[in-house]
Image (tube, rainbow, N blue to C red):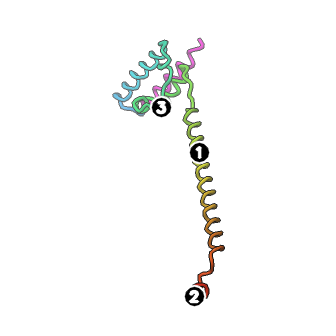
Amino acid sequence: APFVEPIQASQQNLEGLAARLSSEELEDVRRLLGVVLNNATKSNPKYKLLKASNDNLWRRLLRYPEIVTIFETAGFIRENNIANKRAAAAANVEGMRIELERNRINLLIEQALDHSSSTDPPNSEATIVS
């Protein structure tokens, strides 16, 4: 009976959740949970990926840790969105590169201004008078 323990844990999770939700909310969770788990048995891979970015799915199921545990028990794997993390890291690196380039250009401008002011003739009446 390798499935007895996970099933009992899932039942306990639902009981804990039931204590916090209204009967209407709990019925919605149970119905949608059944739909998602049933869809996961289909061959289409789109049913095997649950995106927390899906507002409806998040609001109705994934915000509850007990439900996430049930999904993990059913074989779903929690993944941190690696693609988003890589994109964020790349954007951060690009932002840092832009800031460094901006600082380099500002430094060149400052140096050019300092250099031009030291080569300008002195602004005195003696040099203006002919």
Dot 2, how many residues are within 10 Å of its Cα: few (below 14), some (14-19), or many (20+)?
few
**Front disc: 3 or 2:** 2
* Left/right of residue 30 with respect to residue 105 in the rendered view: left
Q: Nearer the viewer, residue 120 or 71?
A: 120
Instruction: Residue type at mark 1: give it.
Output: Glu
N-terminal label among 3 and 2: 3
**Front disc: 3 or 1:** 1
The residue to which callout 2 is attached is 129
Dot 1, how many residues are within 10 Å of its Cα: few (below 14), some (14-19), or many (20+)?
few
The residue to which callout 3 is attached is 52
As measured in the structure, the alpha-carbon distance from the residue carrying label 1 to the one carrying label 2 is 55 Å
Q: Secondary structure at mark 1?
A: helix
Quadrant of the rendered image containing residue 91: top right
Q: Give the magenta part as a residue range.
A: 1-18
The verdict on residue 3 being magenta is yes
Labels 3 and 1 touching (C-beta < 8 A)? no
The residue to which callout 1 is attached is 94
Instruction: Residue type at mark 2: give it.
Output: Val
